Image: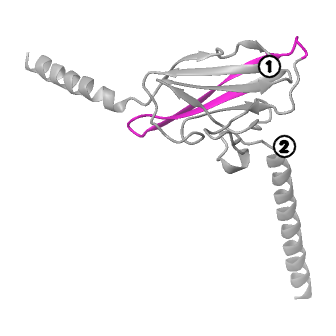
Amino acid sequence: MKLFGSALALFGILALAAPALAHSDLVNQTPMANSTVEAGPIRINLSFDEAPLNLPYGQGNLIAIADAKTGEQLGPACAKIEASSLSTIANISIPGEYKILWRIASEDGHVNQGDFTINVVNNSNYSTEKQGNQCFDEFGNELDINDQELLSKKREPNSGLLEGFFWGLGFILAGSAMGAFFVKRKQKN
């Protein structure tokens, strides 16, 4: 019985501490992960289990969209806060796979982030000059992607392989030069 009482007390402590450990978990999203959507202005709405920390627009609570293959973020990251949801509209005209990235700061100051992919088709021949988020502050000024820390960065294809090749070549040449130096030195003796 004593063991049962201790377990019950521990459960009670953990149950009371659970709200303090919450970190704004994603509970609903539009569009759904892995869904196919039509090109155009795509409304992205993410609902969380608690309201985000009230931070300046374009800082902290963000949604961005990126090319899933290259990682290149398309436009700045931004989100409007509506109760416990973040939303934005991204213009996409080029068919393909895109990654929606999000970051939220919860009321307790903890930051949670994640991503999911969607597929875009363009059966309507929609076109736009600016792909991605179109973010404007409360004064109508467009946010500049260059003034933000990106949620996704463009990956250079095979840059690691090429860099590794040159490092390996450098070691081979340096080793060959040292080997030749020691062979000549030994031949002189």
Q: Amino acid at mark 2?
A: Asn
What residue would you read off at disc 2? Answer: 158
Foreground residue, 91 or 186? 91
Residue ID at (8%, 20%): 2
Question: In the shown orientation, is residue 22 left or right of residue 138?
Answer: left
Nearer the observer, 138 or 83: 138
In the image, farthest residue toward the bottom:
189
Query: Which label's residue is closer to the chain start, 2 or 1?
Result: 1
The residue furthest left is 2
Give how far apart the Cα atoms at labels 2 and 1 are: 32 Å
Q: Quadrant of residue 28?
A: top right
Q: Residue 130's x, y, as percent?
A: 82, 33
Residue behind mark 1: 40
Q: Position of residue 92 (x, y in %)?
A: 80, 25
Vertical order, 124 against 92 (above or below): above
Bounds of the magenta segment: 99-125
Q: In the rendered view of the protein, which quadrant contains the N terminus?
A: top left
Q: Residue at x 70, y 39 (%)?
A: 76
Q: Residue at x 63, y 39 (%)?
A: 137
**Identity of the residue drawn at 79% across and 48% down:** 160
Q: Is 160 left, or right, of 51 in this rendering?
A: right
**Residue 69 found in image quarter:** top right
Percent x, y of residue 169: 87, 59
Residue that protrudes farthest toward the front in the picture: 139
Q: Is residue 114 magenta?
A: yes
* Rendering quarter of residue 5: top left
Q: Is disc 2 in contact with disc 1, using a CB cutoff of under 8 Å?
A: no
The crowd level at tag 2 (other Cα within 10 Å; few <14, some 14-19, many 20+) is few
Magenta stretch contains residue 12: no
* Mark 1: secondary structure: strand
